[in-house]
Amino acid sequence: MGEHKRIGILTSGGDCAGLNAVIRAVVHRAVGTYNWEVMGILRATQGLMHRPPQAVQLDQNQVDATLTLAGTMLGTTNKGNPFAFPMPDGTVRDRSSDIIEGYHQLGLDALIAIGGDGSLAILRKLAQQGGINLVGIPKTIDNDVGVTERSIGFDTAVNIATEALDRLQFTAASHDRVMILEVMGRDAGHIAISAGIAGGADIILIPEIPYTLANICRKIQERQKQGKNYSVVIVSEAVRTETGEVIECSVGFGERRYGGIGHYLAERICDCTGAETRVTVLGHTQRGGIPSPLDRLIASAFGVAAVDLIAEGKYDQIVTWQNRQIVNVAIAEVIDKYQAVDPSGTLVKTARGLGICLGD
Ligand code: F6P
């Protein structure tokens, strides 16, 4: 069974559905199969910065009922790059050595980090600097992590956005309205293109494909001429104005996030088509809810495979999903290959084939 190990696990970046399912799988494999110890590190790298490091030992009983829970039982953060960490006095400090020291203080042999490309890049830098044996697991509703076909949380987010479109279809038709659904995804349009096709949207706008308002209005007017006095539009949060300005809103602490493109479009669509428009901003509902079966399945497979990598002594690797299988690749490769929607890929072709307007 190999030598005894004590491994750490943390969740980093924005939460999503399926994180607890990964933690559960890691604990079952590491404790149940290998008889190792698993330390759950609290609030991502912040738990390692703290003195004493904040971590809890996880056993199989604790993760028994976590398969269907959204969020992360370990807590997370998507703020505070440890290499330029914001201090209470307003200065920034490099806290990387505190994190590395925290890892060694806990006596860890390896660390499993569940994160998106931003978190994984930071953790890899820390691992290289401090001799941390790192294994990565991709998660993000944005599905923009390179190489892997799927990241944990994406499928659930698409289900939620699709369900929202299903609901909007009927109220749009009842009131002869143009309904606009603004979805997350950061710089990539994966949620919008997938949910848009699955939810029967008439117009899908993603940051990867430039649009004109004239094209959008033409589509709505064509439908009106066919007696369809309603349309459903899905738009990714990172879509810009027609002239290329980014639309953001302030979220406090001097930070800004995408948000507002739905309302921008609503006003202009109303002006040019005369249609009554309404906007739904789906927001963080896309990150919650019961994880879909596919997310639970991938989370379970990733968790088991990540522990097996440690058992084989293979580090600086990330587990990915390719052609229905787990494939391990170098974390560096994944970070290098940011994954946006391919404008000439299958989903875009499918949308066009269905007569969905992509704004171009
Ligand atoms: O990366 C996940 C994500 O939900 C993005 O889709 C979104 O732009 C961002 O995080 C929102 O961040 P926050 O949780 O800080 O509002």
Image (cartoon, rainbow, N blue to C red):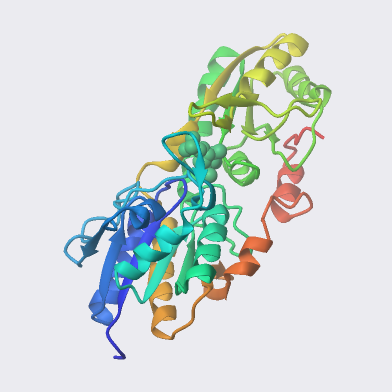
121 to 251, vertically: above or below:
below
Residue 244: x, y in percent? 79, 29
127 to 194, vertically: above or below:
below
Residue 247: x, y in percent? 66, 26
Which residue lies at the image location 27% right of the left edge and 84% below the top edge? Answer: 4
The outermost residue toward the bottom is: 2
On the picture, is 311 further left or further right than 228? Answer: left
Which residue lies at the image location 68% right of the left edge and 62% below the top edge? Answer: 336
Nearer to the camera, 67 or 41: 41
315 to 256, vertically: above or below:
below
Nearer to the camera, 102 or 3: 102
User: Could one spot residue 163 in this view of the protein?
Assistant: no
Residue 67: x, y in percent? 29, 57
Q: Quadrant of residue 52?
A: bottom left
User: Could one spot residue 35 in this view of the protein?
Assistant: yes
Q: Quadrant of residue 356?
A: top right
On the picture, is 185 further left or further right than 343? Answer: left
Residue 182: x, y in percent? 58, 30
State which quarter of the image contains the C terminus.
top right
